[in-house]
Image (cartoon, grey):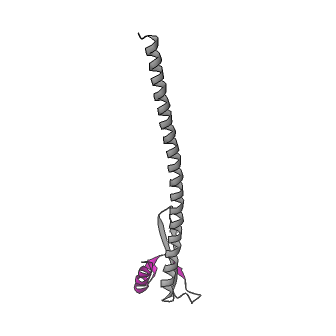
Amino acid sequence: GRNLNELQQFAEVTARKLKEKKEDLQCCQTTLVELDQAFKARYKNWKKTCKLKGKQAAQDFNVRLSRKGHAGTLHFSHEDEKLSLEVTRNSQDTGSAATTDARNLSGGERSYTTLAFE
């Protein structure tokens, strides 16, 4: 085996390496916490931006349709990744029915609705 001095030096080297590894681990854990916080902040900002962009798109859609006397709304479901629309032809007519299916619109209305969406 080894003599007492060799074992003591080996223990000191091993203790120093252990301390370095613990410091490395602490550094990694701190970095992980900081990255997690940064990710959560970015994700929150992204969701807020998506919501604002959806509202802006819905407002723009309605403004464009109103130029032809129609009204419309867009409904965004970011979780389901779906978009639905509702169009009311001749928005001044209280008897006019709204539709959520573009196939119920005439060819010209459908084309104009498509352009209003873009």
Q: Position of residue 104 (x, y in %)?
A: 46, 80
Residue 19 x/y as whole percent: 50, 30
Q: Image height check: is 8 above or below 93?
A: above
Q: Which secondary structure is most common in the magenta stretch?
A: helix
Magenta includes 104? Answer: yes
The magenta segment is 96-118
For the C terminus, the quadrant is: bottom left
Between residue 13 and residue 40, name the one nearer to us: 13
Residue at 51% x, 71% y: name it: 54
Residue in the foreground of this view, choosing between 81 and 23: 23
93 to 47, vertically: above or below: below
User: So how many labels did they put on this image?
Assistant: 0
Residue plotted at (49% across, 75% down)? 57
Is residue 84 visible in this depiction of the protein?
yes
What residue do we see at 40% from left, 84% from top? 107
Tell me if residue 75 can be seen: no
Choose between 98 and 113: the one closer to the eye: 113
Viewer-nearest residue: 7 or 5: 5
Residue depicted at x 51% and y 69%: 76
- Residue pushed farthest right? 94
Q: Is residue 31 magenta?
A: no
Q: Position of residue 64 (x, y in %)?
A: 48, 84
